């Protein structure tokens, strides 16, 4: 008996990114083992610029992840923080975004608040995200259409942003090492009183995805695509939103990798209102949404 051929998938069927997610998680854990070999040794620190330190751990993890992603997905592009960007990625539909050590200042300070981040962008949108905190062995993950989760203590827990709707009850999460002075103005304008500081963009988004904070704002052009791609995928799948400070989607695999219009991430319930208030603060500061900071 001859079986009929399988029916083709509908043209609008959503791609399955489970293989990509599983591979990224495995590589992040392996990279975490590399980081731990450096963690208890006084780091050799160099400076890419006056605000950006880099260590041997950054370089070792970067080289490992770029090599392994290239082996696993040879048709994809790779954009990594510590690798030269030859722009060949612009010809690829899918591009991996690698931040080998998000929170290098926290790594140097030896406080554990740093992560390895891997994201996959397809046609400019984040579709896979992995954020791994190697010292505490905490893994955040998400794939398009499959939800977001955290793995810790040997268990996987589904993530969803908080359902707090009262703006004055919102908890803001900010950078421990790079807190912009403008955040004080934003908090006064919104009449907020609760703030939490933590290292790494990935850990901030993790707190929102867990329901332990409601929004994060970075109103400066200090982040790049590898800082946001993985976390963007995670917060979307947890029910939240990430945009620039003027409420515009962040596109990935651009020639200029700098997020020149800042970052605003939230639970989504009051995102438009927060963006409007933030826009007023930025306008008062003379910052132009058309040309960046």
Image (tube, rainbow, N blue to C red):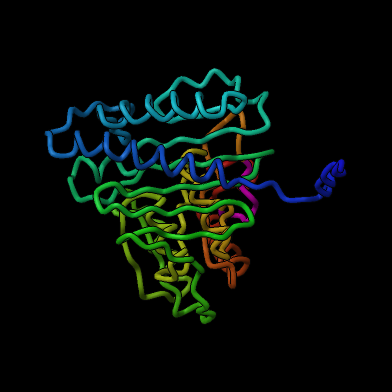
Residue 269, image x, y percentages: 59, 72
Compare residues 18 and 282 and report the one nearer the observer. Answer: 18
* Quadrant hosting residue 19: top right
- Whether residue 194 is in magenta: the answer is no
Name the foreground residue: 177 vs 83: 83
* Residue pictured at 72% horizontal, 50% vertical: 14
| Residue 223 in view, yes or no | no
Question: Residue 200 at x, y = what percent?
Answer: 35, 49
Where the N terminus falls, by quadrant? Answer: top right
Residue drawn at 64 percent across, 25 percent down: 90
Count of marks placed on residues: 0
Residue range of the region highlighted in magenta in the rendering:
245-251
Q: At 48% across and 38% down in the image, what residue appears?
A: 226
Q: Is residue 72 above or below residue 166?
A: above
Q: Residue 127: image x %, image y %?
A: 60, 47
**Is residue 156 shown above or below 164?**
above
Towards the viewer: 134 or 163: 134
Measured from the top left, where is residue 104 in percent x and y? 29, 39
Main secondary structure along the magenta-highlighted residues? loop
Residue drawn at x 42%, y 59% is 150
Q: Is residue 266 visible?
A: yes
Q: Quadrant of residue 122?
A: top right
View extreme (front): residue: 1
Displayed quadrant of residue 54 = top left
């Amino acid at each position: 008996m001859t079986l009929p051929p399988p029916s083709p998938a509908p043209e609008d069927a959503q791609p399955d990114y489970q293989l990509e997610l599983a591979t990224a998680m495995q590589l992040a854990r392996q990279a975490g083992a590399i980081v731990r070999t450096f963690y208890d040794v006084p780091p050799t620190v160099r400076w890419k610029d006056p605000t950006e330190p880099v260590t041997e751990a950054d370089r070792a993890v970067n080289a490992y992840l770029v090599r392994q992603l290239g082996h696993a997905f040879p048709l994809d592009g790779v954009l990594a923080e510590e690798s030269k960007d030859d722009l060949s990625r612009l010809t690829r539909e899918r591009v991996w975004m690698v931040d080998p050590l998000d929170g290098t200042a926290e790594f140097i300070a030896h406080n554990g608040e740093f992560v390895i981040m891997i994201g996959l962008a397809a046609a400019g949108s984040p579709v896979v995200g992995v954020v791994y905190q190697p010292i505490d062995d905490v893994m955040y993950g998400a794939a398009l259409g499959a939800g977001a989760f955290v793995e810790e203590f040997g268990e996987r827990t589904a993530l969803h942003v908080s359902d707090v709707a009262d703006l004055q009850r919102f908890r803001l999460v900010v950078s421990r090492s790079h807190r912009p002075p403008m955040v004080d103005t934003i908090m006064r304008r919104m009449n907020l009183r609760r703030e939490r500081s933590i290292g790494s963009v990935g850990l901030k988004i993790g707190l929102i995805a867990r329901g332990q904070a409601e929004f994060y704002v970075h109103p400066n052009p200090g982040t790049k695509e590898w800082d946001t791609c993985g976390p963007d995928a995670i917060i979307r799948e947890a029910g939240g939103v990430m945009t620039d400070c003027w409420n515009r989607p962040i596109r990935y695999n651009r020639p200029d990798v700098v997020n020149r219009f800042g970052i605003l991430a939230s639970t989504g319930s009051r995102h438009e209102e927060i963006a409007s208030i933030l826009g007023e603060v930025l306008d008062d500061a003379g910052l132009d949404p058309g040309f960046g900071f």
